[in-house]
Every structure is written in structure tokens, then in C-alpha cells.
Amino acid sequence: MTIVASGLDLYGILQVDPRAEAGVIQAAYRALALRMHPDHSRNDNTAGAMAMLNRAYGVLRDPGQRSAYDQTRSSTTALPIADARTSTVSERLRPRSDDRGAESMTVSFGRYQGWTLQQISQQDPEYLEWLRRHSSGIGYRRQIDVILDAKRTAAAVAAPNRRRR
């Protein structure tokens, strides 16, 4: 089965724009590899995530394989090229709705695609802090701030109680 037939979006896995230069792809791979490597992560599913990351980078770093992937990818999408760029970049990075609360706002890209911000904060709070600083999280910042402020408040309330014991 080819990569396109498997339904994987290699650019989505690396969280880069399909028009990204080789240096950007390499930087994204290295940053994600540091976070997802089984030796450095506490998550149980990092081996599978790292395998997908390596697979995506293996194709996108080679100009010939990338070109072939892009041609196959563009022929399988029904959208015109301009619409495909819009849907893979701005639509993917935009939260599904701005009026939803932090508990129900769902991330629509990356390794936590389909997760709510609250679920991410419980599983990987460092990722949530990274997402708040990163440009791809710009639409989520208000809701991330609510979650992070609540965590800081809870930690501040719990801290004096720990000292008294």
C-alpha cells in the first residue's frame, strides 16, 4: 500500500505547509523527534508516532520521493490547488469554533488531532504550553490560557497545604 493510499498526510504528520522548504521540514522533524522519541517521552504510544514521523520525513526529505508524493497527493484530492493549500494550512490550524469552551475545543492537526485541549492538558501539559507559544496554536491561545491559569491556581492553592503537613 502506498503512503497516499494509506490516508496519511505526511505534511500533517510533520505539521508543516506543503510548500515548506527542505530546511523547515528538517527543523520540524527534529523538533517533533525530540518530543516523540520513546527514550524521551512518557507516552506509551510514542514508538508508533515516531515510526510515522520517520516515515514522513524519509519521503519528504528526498526531493525525488517528495515530488512523486506531491503528484500522487494532488491527483487524489478533488480540490483545486489553491483550495487544497487553504484547507491544509489555514483550515487545519483554525479551531473548529471560537465560541466553544476550552473543555470541548478540539485540535484539528498533529499528533493530538481529535483531542480536546483539556485532554491534552492532562496527558501532555508541556505540549499545551508549546502549542500556546507556537504559531499553529494562535487560534487556541485564549482557551489554552484558561486551562493553564486554572492549573496554576490549583497548584498555588495546593502548595501551602503541602507545606503545613
Image (cartoon, rainbow, N blue to C red):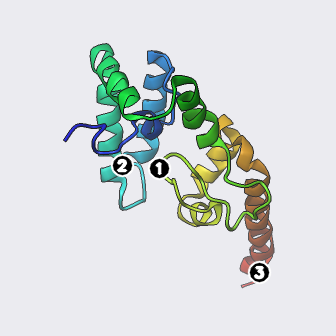
Which of 106/149 is in front? 106
Which of 66/27 is in front? 66
For the N terminus, which image quadrant?
Answer: top left
| Residue 38 visible, this angle | no
Q: Residue at x 76, y 81 (%)?
A: 161
| Three-letter code, disc 1 | Arg
Q: Residues within 10 Å of mark 1 (few under 14, many from 20)?
A: some
Quickly name the residue at label 2. 49
For marks 1 and 3 on the same chain, the one whose residue lies earlier in the sequence: 1
Q: Residues within 10 Å of mark 3 (few under 14, many from 20)?
A: few
Q: Is residue 160 left or right of residue 14?
A: right
Q: Secondary structure at mark 1?
A: loop
Quickly name the residue at label 3. 161
Residue placed farthest to the left in the image? 1
Is there CB contact under 8 Å for labels 2 and 1?
A: yes
Distance Cα–Cα, label 2 vs label 1: 8 Å
Q: Is residue 1 left or right of residue 104?
A: left
For marks 3 and 2 on the same chain, the one whose residue lies earlier in the sequence: 2
Q: Position of residue 44 (x, y in %)?
A: 36, 62
Q: Is residue 41 left or right of residue 106?
A: left
Q: Residues within 10 Å of mark 2 (few under 14, many from 20)?
A: some
Q: Nearer the viewer, mark 3 or mark 2?
A: 2
Is there CB contact under 8 Å for labels 3 and 2?
A: no
Q: Which mark is residue 119?
A: none
Distance Cα–Cα, label 1 vs label 3: 36 Å
| Residue 124 visible, this angle | yes
| Three-letter code, disc 3 | Asn
Which of 17/54 is in front? 17
Quickly name the residue at label 1. 111
For the C terminus, which image quadrant?
Answer: bottom right
| Three-letter code, disc 2 | Ala
